[in-house]
Image (cartoon, rainbow, N blue to C red):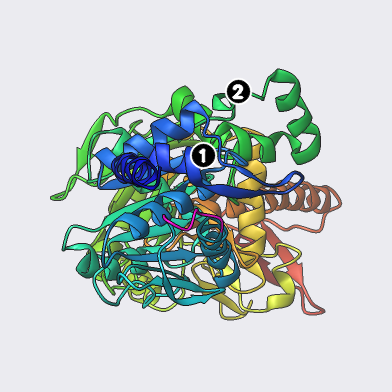
Amino acid sequence: MAEQLKQVIKQEYIKSAKDPAYFLRKYCVIQHPIKGKVPFDLYDFQEKTIEEFENNRMNVILKARQLGISTLTAGYALWMMTFHQDKNILVIATKQDVAKNLVTKVRVMHANLPSWLKQRCVEDNKLSLRYVNGSQVKAVSSGPEAARSEALSLLILDEAAFIDKIDDIWTASQATLTTGGQCIALSTPNGVGNWFHKTWVEAEEGRGMFNFIKLHWSVHPDRDDTWRKEQDILLGPSGAAQECDCDFLTSGTGVIDPILLENLRKKSCNDPLEKRGIDSNCWIWEPPDYTKNYVVCADVSRGDGTDYSAFHIIEVESLEQVAEYKGRINTKDFGNMLVSISTEYNDALLIIENNNIGWATIQQVIDRDYPNLFYTSKDLKYVDVQHQLTNKFRTSERNMVAGFSTTMKTRPLIIAKLEEYFRDESVVVRSNRLIDELLTFVYVNNRAEAMAGYNDDLVMSFAIGLWVRDTALRLRTEGIELTKKTLTAMNQEGVYTPNDNNNGEWDWDIGKDKKKESLEWLL
């Protein structure tokens, strides 16, 4: 009888060692939130996921919530430790407590194994479990140095889309995975442009080293349309799309609705008619129409190699993007390019962001005596009431400065204007480059900026152009009309006197001695 029992145990041990799904289903216990400790009865999609783990060294899992994938991954880690020597498994999550939860799942399963399967422990605490056979699992919080340690057999990135600075973690882990270690990166989506999204897209397109596994809410046999509708009520449509439908676009904290951006891409983006310059980065969609007015809005590169100089040309009435540039160019050449393109587009109003390095480009434009450079008030109290002016004459008297100043006051205003125009679908965007930047333009600690590793040069220059078009340019137009009406009324009352040089159109008697001064500069 004892010999027969030994044979059964031997067969079961061999079968469990060969098949992790069999091991989990037959011998592992999990902690159910309502039922307590229950056998780990695998669903079909969970068994298939385990097969993917066995057949692929690198796996990225895009999953819906509450599918038990973290528990499944914990079970796979336990199987590796139990049946293999010297397996080093590291769990990294957004916080140490989150990583600790996965290790806790491993510890619960280990504690409830039959005695003949259970390995002897040399360390067992909330953050780690280590066996006498040299295998171990431990949890750490995210950080650039988190994975820079001894060689890893398995790296688990739990909720990878939410891990801060995961790009640095992944780079650091490469040295530790070179001996053939595996990686399982699992997460619900958290917007686009982050490491998890990029890794997923590359895997879907057959690039990179990862195998992709998508687990939609519908893979769970106990869920139906009624359950899905309840999630809309509980989480809201956007939250449910993220947590249940594995939808990258509706997740995240993008400044502009990503679904709107993708619709805009399909509706109006197309290839340019012409690509100019030695780098072919000046894209033209529409040639100048001499019956229309344009603005050229530019952002100058800091010159540190991580960003770009950029400009857009926008038709004032239709808000159609007709040209765009994004490239690395020195400040003097950029100034010459702006003068040339602005002159071509009917002496367009030229708006240059004047922070830091922008002054070098602005000076080149001034040296070229470009006639329609944007000036703004240095008096911050005028920013809120939109007293920017666009006429270079008598600027020193009016306390004006060339270019647009992005400050703590103006930045939220121009971004709000950007969001408003896109929300109302009032702009016509031709450039896929701009759409791509907008998709990675997100709120980070309540500040709108590009995701780490991305740029927002096209976004910020476009936002500045929309702001000026809607404030200073509109007010200037309204002011011209008001001034004309006022001066015409004065002229009708006999205030104006003729002048031989300009027929007295805008001359006015000033002061007690009736000196004449032209008021044409008001226009």
Q: Position of residue 502 (x, y in %)?
A: 56, 54
Q: CA distance from mark 2 to mark 1?
A: 15 Å
Residue 196 position within the rendered picture, expressed as x and y whole percent measured from the top left: 41, 50
Residue sitting farthest toward the top: 225
**Badge 2 is on which residue?**
221
Give residue 205's quadrant in the image.
Answer: top left
In the rendered structure, which amino acid carries the disc numbered 1?
Lys
Please state which amino acid type lies under the numbered disc 2: Pro
| Other residues around mark 2 within 10 Å, as few (<14) / some (14–19) / many (≥20) | few
Residue 517 against residue 10 in the figure, above or below? below
Give how far across and how far down residue 487 sits, in percent. Answer: 76, 53
Q: Which residues are magenta?
A: 112-116
Q: Nearer the viewer, residue 90 or 144?
A: 90
Q: Is residue 516 magenta?
A: no
Residue 390 visible: no
Q: Quadrant of the N terminus?
A: top left
